[in-house]
Image: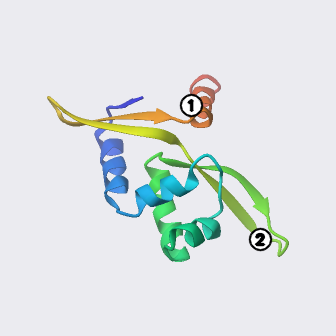
Amino acid sequence: MRITDPALRGKILEALGDPDSPRILHALGNVPKNAQTLADETEIPLSSIYRKLAVLRAAGLVLVKSSEITPEGKRQDLFAAAVTEVRMGLGKGGVELELIPTDESASRIWFKLFNS
């Protein structure tokens, strides 16, 4: 999926400019994880994980796969990577981005487009 919207392209580049973003995306891999697990695996403080996940979600690079209720009665989101690959190049208009979505994020996009 080629990103042509300049605002979205800016959000993606900003999100990827954070040195922790690749670590978070890599830690997500193919298994949805909650924020605490991501913090433990990446050794990024939990408060920073939440902030960085919000930026990655706004850029469309991470999605909430599901939510669960903990034994303490708190809601806990399970996060998943929305892309398997980000391709970047230089074109006539500057930086060009292409995102290769995961199967799940592709089906969510399809559902939103055709079930509005």
Residue sitting farthest toward the left: 92
Q: CA distance from mark 2 to mark 1?
A: 29 Å
Residue on which disc 2 sits: 74
Image quarter where the N terminus lies is: top left
Percent of width and height locating residue 69: 80, 64
Q: Secondary structure at mark 1?
A: helix
Residue that extends furthest to the top in the rendered view of this protein: 114
Q: Residue drawn 73% across and 56% down?
A: 67
Between 66 and 28, the one nearer to me in the picture: 28
Position above or below: 20 against 89: below
Left or right of 44 on screen, residue 98: left
Label 2, secondary structure: give it. Answer: loop
Q: Provide residue 38's location: percent of width, then percent of height.
A: 58, 65
Residue 6 point in image, percent of width and height: 28, 40
Labels 2 & 1 near each other (Cβ < 8 A): no
Residue 7 drawn at (x, y percent): 32, 44
Q: Is residue 25 left or right of residue 66?
A: left
Question: Mark 1 packing: few (<14 Cα in 10 Å), some, or many (20+)?
Answer: some
Work out whether mark 2 precedes mark 1 in sequence or the reverse, and give the earlier one.
Answer: 2
Q: Which mark is residue 24?
A: none
Nearer the viewer's eye, disc 2 or disc 1?
1
Type of the residue with mark 1: Ala
Image position of 89 with respect to 33: above or below: above
User: Mark 2 packing: few (<14 Cα in 10 Å), some, or many (20+)?
Assistant: few
Q: Is residue 15 left or right of residue 68?
A: left
Q: Residue at x 56, y 26 (%)?
A: 113
**Which residue is at a point 57% across and 49% down the rendered structure image?**
29
Q: Which residue is mark 1?
A: 106
The residue positioned 36% from the left and 48% from the top of the image is: 12
Q: Quadrant of the C terminus?
A: top right
Of the residues shown, which amino acid type is indicated by label 2?
Lys
